[in-house]
Amino acid sequence: MYILVTNDDGISSEGLLALKQALAKVGTVVVIAPDHNWSAAGHSKTMHKPLRIHKVKLPDGDYGYSTDGAPSDCVAIGVLGFLPDQPGLVVSGINKGANLGDDITYSGTVAAAMEGSIFGLPAIAVSLVDYSPDPEANNFAYAADFAARLAAHVLDNGLGNEVLLNVNVPNLASEKINGVEITRLGKRVYRDELIERTDPYGRKYYWIGGERPTGIIARGTDIKAIAEGKVSVTPIHLDLTHHRLLKQLRAWDLRV
Ligand code: MN
């Protein structure tokens, strides 16, 4: 039994390394991560091309595996028998940037944890909110230690069927972090625009982008906890059914 560590930012991300090193205090860690950045790639399964796996040396001298598959493929590779042993826990991250509210539907980080859940494994996704391109300005160490503490609890207690924990950690100095809150998903406010430009050959192209999303500060949500400088832990399950609408829809006469 080992802890499978992956991410969506790619095998060379310092967030992945910090997570791997912290989790090594909790159990045996195996890294299987994508060979390039898959951020916002969502939950995918590579079906129409072969996957290559390379043994690679990580910056701390240990070995891991990189693949040309998606973050969720990395988890499937681990579970479906690439290694003689089975993972007992999947931990994905530490992502460079938040995965709050609706973000989790886009997130490759969370998708990797979802893949673990679908295989019946406990899983944790960890993200660093307000990641900075200046490497000196990122406190991956606190997020990694928190993830290791949480992983120890998950290994001791389990999580129940098809549940993952979505963790967001403020990118603050450790002494400025204002505690931990167990939260529900909040509502993101995206500020994307469709940018139209012209390429050097005179053809139009389009780019979707814009300012960082904001969110609605509502009680009990991940978005509010983060706004208050707290670590947010949200239990997520993959049953997307809207249970309250079932009865109403069944009353509709939908026969032709
Ligand atoms: Mn990412």
Image (cartoon, rainbow, N blue to C red):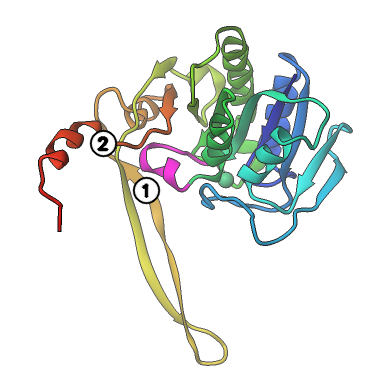
Picture coordinates of residue 50, whole percent (x, y): 75, 57
| Residue in the picture at 70% in, 38% down | 14
Q: Does the magenta stretch include residue 44?
A: no
| Residue in the picture at 62% in, 12% down | 155
SS at mark 1 in the image: strand
| Residue in the picture at 66% in, 37% down | 75
Query: Which residue is outermost to the bottom?
Result: 202
Q: Mark 1 points at which residue?
A: 213
Quarter assignment of residue 158? top right
| Residue in the picture at 55% in, 45% down | 108
Q: Name the residue under label 2.
A: 242
Packing grade of label 2 (10 A; few <14, some 14-19, many >=20) is few
Viewer-nearest residue: 38 or 169: 38
Q: How far apart are marks 1 and 2 (CA)?
A: 25 Å
Residue type for callout 2: His
Picture coordinates of residue 34, whole percent (x, y): 70, 47
Residue 132, placed above or below residue 202 = above
Picture coordinates of residue 251, whole percent (x, y): 10, 40
Left or right, 85 with reference to 71 = right
Left or right, 18 with reference to 241 = right
